Image (cartoon, grey):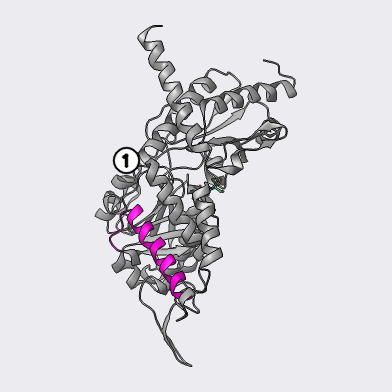
Amino acid sequence: MTSKQESAVNKNKLDHDFAQKYKADFPILNQQINGKDLVYFDNAATTQKPEAVLEAVNNYNRTINANPHRGAHTLSVRATEAYENARAKVSNFINAEKAEEIIFTRNTTESLNLLANSLEAVVEEGDEILISVLEHHSNILPWQQLAERKNLNLKFLYPDQSYRIPLSELKEKLTDKTKILSISQMSNVSGVINPVKEMAELAHQKDALVVVDGAQGAPHIKTDVRDLNADFYAFSGHKMLAPMGIGVLYGKKDLLEELPPFLKGGGMIEYVKEQGSTYAPLPEKFEAGTPNVEGAVGLQAAIEYLEEIGLDKIKEHELELTAYALEKMKQLDYVEIAGPLNLENRGGIISFNIKDVHSHDLATIVDSEGIAIRSGHHCAQPLMNYYQINSTGRISFYLYNTKAEVDRFLEALEKVREVFGYGS
Ligand code: C6P
């Protein structure tokens, strides 16, 4: 064996060992779907939970469950501690300056809606909001609505043919009227990672507020909100091994203090009189109603699990899988990839089409082989319109996926062709 062949074998072994080691922690992955070992390639939609997360949530419910911040009894005090420990963990995970800069929400969607509602207080008619055509609907609709309510101009950034938004595009679109730039850290369709730090710097030169949709970023990219200098950063627990129903809105303390709350009710007040009320300090001001403590506990356990492995290592593994899959898919003349073909500023998401096959048919046939992929418009219709594609199939990787699974997927693509009578 030549040394090149040897190092290729070692790399394959590393990939196999890495994923196999962690896959064993995820009970759901150890099952057959349609008579075949499950391959889970829908991680951009939601991820699976390791034993450590299942156990933490179970343990919380078995031994602590109570309403936090509302009781003097021991369980309530313990629930408060569990909830606030989780907040501290999240704060540390994204390197926020203070734990009260972390607002727990249900998900990225709620975080962005909260923000778009509260920011109503700082915009005026004629101001501009800048987003990109690549955004998920959750980072479009709240701004559309704000623009309608306050007579603002909603402007769009457009990518080039490589699916990337050039900084020159941002420079051109920013004006003295731009009040908000809201941009995703990583596209859920093309897998492109935006240069959010550079974008934030340019937007701040115009005194605009910078909102980063980290739904696809936080789970895969080591994120430091202070280094990014994002004013606000939103993400979802369920895309990073935690339960559904727990999300985060980070905001710089002075900005959050200035903004009015979105939801009102129990848990967020200082004094309530018959006419008029005052609000609790951060973070409670933005957390009306009984919170999702078990979700927060699960998120803490998920972060601990990810940190133990290291996000950098996970990203490296995902990129290795992406390079492998892209290389093979590029060789198939019936596959059209909707995203960059190289690894530059890219994560482990590949959207694609099989010529003359609708993505839902594709996903159904692949599912019959035990492989879960997503299909459709991925809640990014403006992107689909811009590139004039109807829908795509999408595979998205996480730490537990392997090259052997990519091979199974490639074989399944052949089957799709056969079912439609195109042959190989
Ligand atoms: N994208 C996907 O399959 P929620 O649903 O609130 O947890 O996340 C919304 C969201 C916001 N921004 C981006 C970039 C996203 O990818 C998502 C969720 C999933 O692509 C579900 S549509």
Mark 1 sits on what residue?
Answer: 168
Per the rendered image, the range of residues in magenta is 76-98
Q: Residues within 10 Å of mark 1 (few under 14, many from 20)?
A: few
Relative image position of residue 278 (x, y in whole percent): 39, 84
Instruction: Identify which residue, 178 or 49, lies in the foreground.
Output: 49
Q: Is residue 247 left or right of residue 369?
A: left
Q: Is residue 405 left or right of residue 248?
A: right
Amino acid type of the residue that numbered disc 1 sits on in the rendered structure: Ser
Q: Is residue 64 above or below residue 305?
A: below
The quadrant of the rendering that contains the C terminus is: top right
Q: Which element carries disc 1, helix, strand or loop? A: helix
The quadrant of the rendering that contains the N terminus is: top left
Residue in the picture at 46% in, 46% down? 216
Relative image position of residue 170 (x, y in whole percent): 34, 46
Residue at the farthest top position: 1
Relative image position of residue 313 (x, y in whole percent): 38, 36
Q: Is residue 100 above or below residue 168?
A: below
Say if residue 341 shows up in the picture: no
* Some atom of ligand 1 lies within 8 Å of the CB belonging to the residue at label 1: no
Q: Quadrant of residue 172?
A: top left
Relative image position of residue 387 (x, y in whole percent): 53, 36
Residue in the picture at 52% in, 37% down? 23
Residue in the picture at 38% in, 70% down? 283
Instruction: Identify which residue, 168 or 88, lies in the foreground.
Output: 88
